Image (cartoon, rainbow, N blue to C red):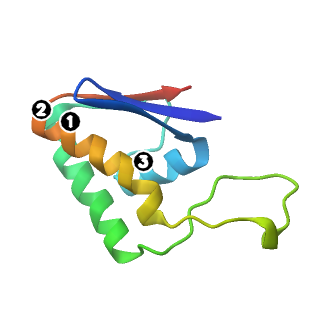
Amino acid sequence: MLVTFRTPAYADITMFGNVAETLLELMGHSGTIPGALLAEDIPEALGRLKAAVGEHPDRPLDPETSGEREEEQVHVSLAHRALPLIELLAAAAAAKENVIWDKA
């Protein structure tokens, strides 16, 4: 499953479903897809996500894969996975726009 985040203030961002769910939970959201954040709730969610990244920037956050051996996987850190969403949330907060997400 893929999840797309949308706001009028920034380009759409699509990511793997389990990665998106983890990032949503780090923002303090239930991880429900589809979902939304109202403009007034975005600064708090952004702060939570930044704090989580600050605590564990090198934590691997990889999509679920089937059939790949561990040594064949390339691990991507939480900091790298979260960066596009952090930028989207920051742009939405600055423009006072809502953010929605759903299955792509």
Image location (x, y in percent) of residue 33: 50, 32
- Per the model, the C-alpha gap separating discs 2 and 1 is 5 Å
Q: Is residue 50 left or right of residue 4?
A: left
Q: Is residue 63 left or right of residue 50?
A: right
Which residue is at a point 51% across and 46% down the rendered structure image?
21
Residue of label 2? 95
Of callouts 1 and 3, which one flags the residue occurring earlier in the amino acid sequence?
3
- Per the model, the C-alpha gap separating discs 3 and 2 is 21 Å
Residue of label 1? 92
- Secondary element at image label 2: helix
Residue of label 3? 24
Which residue is at a point 20% across and 35% down the rendered structure image?
92
Give the amino acid type for the residue marked by disc 3 in the picture.
Leu
Above or below residue 25? Residue 73 is: below
Image location (x, y in percent) of residue 102: 49, 27
Residues at discs 2 and 1 in contact (Cβ within 8 Å):
yes
